[in-house]
Amino acid sequence: MRKMGSIQDVEEAVKVSRLVLSGNSLAQPDLTNVDDTKKVLSAFLPARSQLTISAEQKRYGYDSSLYSSKPTDALDQFLSQLCPSLPVDLMPGEKDPTAPTMPQQALHPAMLPNAAVWENFNGRSNPWSFEINGTSYAFLPFHLLERN
C-alpha cells in the first residue's frame, strides 16, 4: 500500500543507487533565515541549565560546557536508517571535525558507531572521485575552488 507520492515519484525513487553526503554534515546550522531559532538551537546545544561556565571547564580557549553530541548522534541515527537500503558515502567538509590539511581524512567510524557497522556505510576522504555506470564523479573541496 502506497503512503506518499505518486507512482512517478516511486519510480524515480527506485532509481537512486547511492547517497553521497559531500561535507559539513556536522557544521553548525545557519540561523540567519530561521523563524524559530530556539527550536533549531535546542537540537544542537545542551540545555540552558548545562551552560554554566567555570574556570575549570574552560581550558586552552575551548569551553567544554558548550559541547553537545546531539548533532553527531542525530547524523549517526539518520545514516543507520539509510544504510540498510542503499550505499552511503560520507565526506568531511571544511567545518567538520577533521584535520584541516588536504586531503581531509574520513570521519572516524567511532564518531558514528551505529552507521559504521553497516557494510553500505563508507567514510570517504575529501577530495574523492568514483564511477557509477560508466560516469565519473569528482568531489573537490569548494573552499579551495573559491579562492583566487
Image: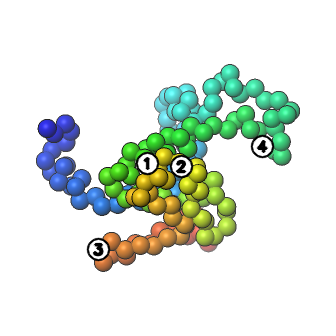
- Report how far apart the C-alphas of labels 4 and 1 lie in the structure: 29 Å
* Image coordinates for residue 107, horizontal then vertical, percent: 57, 57
Label 4 crowd bin: few (<14), some (14–19), many (20+), radius 10 Å: few
Q: Which residue is mark 4?
A: 62
At a point 68% along the width and 21% down the height, the residue shown is 49
Image mark for residue 112: 2
Residue 141, label in figure: none
User: In the image, is residue 63 above or below residue 125?
Assistant: above
Q: How many marks?
A: 4
Residue drawn at (37%, 49%), measured in percent from left and top?
82
Q: Are marks 1 and 2 in contact (CB under 8 Å)?
A: yes
Q: CA distance from mark 4 to mark 2?
A: 23 Å
Residue beneath disc 3: 133
Query: How far is the residue under mark 1 from the one under mark 3?
Result: 24 Å
The vertical placement of 131 against 15, above or below, is below
Q: Position of residue 121 (x, y in %)?
A: 44, 57
Comparing labels 4 and 1, the label whose residue is closer to the camera: 1
- Mark in the foreground, 1 or 3: 1
Determine the secondary structure under disc 2: loop
Question: Callout 4, which amino acid?
Answer: Tyr
User: Which three-letter amino acid code belongs to the residue tagged 3?
Assistant: Asn
Residues marked 4 and 3 touching at CB (< 8 Å): no
* Depth check, front residue: 124 or 36: 124
Amino acid of disc 1 = Leu
Q: Is residue 32 visible?
A: no
Residue on which disc 1 sits: 79
